[in-house]
Amino acid sequence: MEESQQKVAGEGRSKLLTTGGVLSIIGGIYGVGLAVMLAIFGGVPGFPAVTGLAVGSIRGAQAGVTEFTFAAVAMVALLGGIDALKRRNFVFAIAGAIYAFFCTGLPAVYGILYRADLAGNPWGIVLPVVGLVGIVAIICVAARRGEFRPGVEG
């Protein structure tokens, strides 16, 4: 396929890079949502107690560290997704995609490890699928490194 056919009309960027940026932003929003749930409920509603993430199971200093970590990682994912959409800084865009994987992939690991405990629970289906968001974001951004502005590498 020609390069001109892969460009989004009028925007000068490929659909692949746009997809990677949008998925990074989605991963960041998911991470912010987890941080908010941890802050409000002290855990994730619907999770069984055996996972350690059930409502009320995260308390005190552990709760503060967990919430702050998810929020910080999610912010990097959001800002990296914006940089990918603007084609501004490849290093920050790929970091955002990797952090989007942390926001979506780590909960996915919980879903896979505790799939027997999550049987019949909507989280058992959602978590492993959401984990793909970060992986696809990394692939899409990394594949389009050449589209970023030269001289702005980091």
Image (cartoon, rainbow, N blue to C red):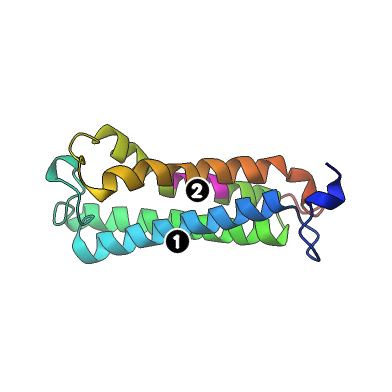
Residue position marked by numbered label 1 in the rendering: 29
The magenta segment is: 97-102
Is 154 placed left or right of 98 in the picture? right
| Sequence-earlier tag: 1 or 2 | 1
Q: Is residue 76 visible?
A: no
What type of secondary structure mainly makes up the magenta span? helix
* Residue positioned 14% across, 51% down in the render: 57
Q: Residues within 10 Å of mark 2 (few under 14, many from 20)?
A: many
Disc 2 residue type (three-letter) = Tyr
For residue 116, above or below residue 101: above
The percent coordinates of residue 113 (x first, y second) are 27, 33
Does the CB distance between marks 1 and 2 fall below 8 Å? no
* Residue positioned 32% across, 44% down in the render: 125
Is 63 placed left or right of 153 in the picture? left
Q: Which mark is drawn over residue 78?
A: none
Disc 1 residue type (three-letter) = Ile
Q: Which mark is drawn over residue 99?
A: 2
Q: Residues within 10 Å of mark 1 (few under 14, many from 20)?
A: many
Residue 40 among magenta residues? no
